[in-house]
Image (cartoon, rainbow, N blue to C red):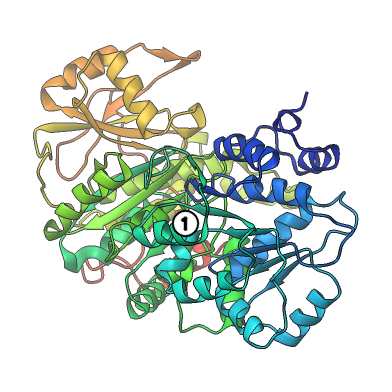
Amino acid sequence: MNKFEALGLNPSLVKAVAEMGFESPSEIQEKAIPVLLNEDTDMVALAQTGTGKTAAFGFPLIQKINAKSGHTQALILSPTRELCLQITNELKNYAKFEKGLNPVAVYGGASISGQAKEISRGAQIIVATPGRMQDMINRKMVDISKINYCVLDEADEMLNMGFYEDITNILSHTPKEKHTWLFSATMPKEVATIAKKFMARPIEITVGSKNQGATNVSHEYYMVNSRQRYDALKRLADANPDIFSVIFCRTKRDTQKVAEKLIEDGYSAAALHGDLSQNQRDLVMKSFRTKQIQMLVATDVAARGIDVDDITHVINYQLPDEIETYTHRSGRTGRAGKSGVSIVIVSKSELRKIKSIERIIQQKFEQKDIPDGMEICRVQLFHLANDIKETKINHEIDPYLPSINEVLEDFSREELIKKFFSVEFTRFFNYYKNSPDLSTGAPGDHGGDSTRFFINIGAKDGFDWMSLKDFLKATLNLGRDDVFKVDAKSTFSFFNTNASETDKVLETFKDFQYNGRHIDVEVTTDSGRGKRKGGKKGKKFPEGRKFSGGGKKEKSGNKKGGRGRNIESSLKRRRTKK
């Protein structure tokens, strides 16, 4: 029996699920769907963003709706236009084989009369933002007095955005005997008030614990001087060439300023905040979803409703005023079963907030150092090598090969590789070789008594930083805190141990194999901790890298630093998403 069929879904929904490629229900779906299908009840469901909540209420709703009747039977309230449209589209996909079922989206920024006409033609389910729904009720354009179900999706988000009065007003126009399903990531007192006022003995379902962060998101913080916050942001982007991220700022002004500086420095970035028109917001989000933009700088309000599964990093350029908001920010990554990273850039005065967040999300932060210039060069170098490995050969070049071979015939294979990689590496090396250390000391920092290592395994070997740390601790037989600052990249990683363990690490991995291939572990230069040693004799720092997104303009005390106008324009061309 299909796993979704076992939850009680009818054949038409199971067929739609199969066509959409869903294989197994998420935890919130397993807990909520059977209850909502088999019982006429109110429900409060607490689960992180990205855990499949839309399907958790969408499948039971569709199965309980009478598609043959055109009157409105269900109302779904969601905080933003983007989320409203997304829920509507998902419901249409779920109801693909339910003849006559018509979900309609109601939101601001579009013709209210057009939406009213669509509802009048028959809309069993209305998906609405609170503001537009209240407007339609006031104009008597919609009748929700006979609905059977009301869903409050992202309830905490709606209340954070100031929709409490709208929601209570809207609910006052619905029948008391309806069933209300409230879905929320957190349970602040305002959400509890709504539940108490408008729900009767609701069943409560919790995935994780209340306000807890998603377990597949790792949390890191980097401590820097406040004036170097932007430089630190660029370094973090450079150290993660495949980054696809949302960067959170507290104010619209800071959001616009950071986005403009990133664009000026050659990154594919854009701002998303409340001063943008709806058309501008739509264009930005379209570019972000298609990955033409890799770094979306946003305010908390503007980012609500962003639902993109492949976000690799959330970067807290500034921590939110309300600590609970961090849960929503970090929930933008690690979606659909994938792992993600939530990064916080903090000054010393903000360290206490990290401890507060840890108590709320019930997860620990890993303190890490801002990567130094040489580490970034190495990351970008191996990224280029991997890009070359994965590039499909364009045979249109074949007619030109004899002439190219003639130009390069005097060079050995090793010389050609060095020259090829040096085209980009030299530019970045010249820029980064005198770059300062941006990290500042902090409680729990191991400081200068540690050694940083390079290891040639990473995400493509199935490791994230947590699993790699566990692997290293077990392999080296070290204690819980003896392996730290683990940074897993695509095909390689970095980690630290106490300096006293250096010889042990090198000896353990001298002839070590993992899954049939040799593991190379070497000491690497990091923030002035010393030169690399071990590994292959005479091996020097490798050259080269396409550097798509690395080595941007940075205030480093090296005014020109070998970075001329030609370098900057070259980098901008290379950073643009193809």
Above or below — where is 121 with respect to 304? below
Above or below — where is 82 with respect to 188? below
Q: Which of the two residues, 22 or 176, is positioned nearer the viewer here?
A: 176
Quick check: 405 left or right of 211? right
Quick check: 44 left or right of 64? left
Evaluate whether residue 32 shows in this view: yes
Question: Image point 20% across, 56% down: which residue?
Answer: 434
Instruction: Identify the amino acid type marked 1.
Output: Ala
* Few, some or many residues within 10 Å of mark 1 (<14, 14–19, 20+): some
> Which residue lies under the disc numbered 1?
195
Q: Give the position of the N terminus as an image quadrant.
A: top right
Quadrant of the rendered image containing residue 487: top left
Count of numbered marks: 1
Q: Which of the two residues, 112 or 278, is positioned nearer the viewer here?
A: 112
Question: Image point 81% across, 44% down: which residue?
Answer: 16
Question: Image point 84% across, 70% down: which residue?
Answer: 122
Q: Give the position of the C terminus as an image quadrant.
A: bottom right
Asked which secondary structure carries label 1, the reply is helix
Above or below — where is 263 with respect to 392? below
Question: Image point 10% across, 48% down: which residue?
Answer: 441
Q: Which of the two residues, 528 or 107, is positioned nearer the viewer here?
A: 107
Evaluate whether residue 536 shows in this view: no
The percent position of residue 402, horizontal first and vertical second, equals 71, 47
Quadrant of the rendered image containing residue 322: bottom left
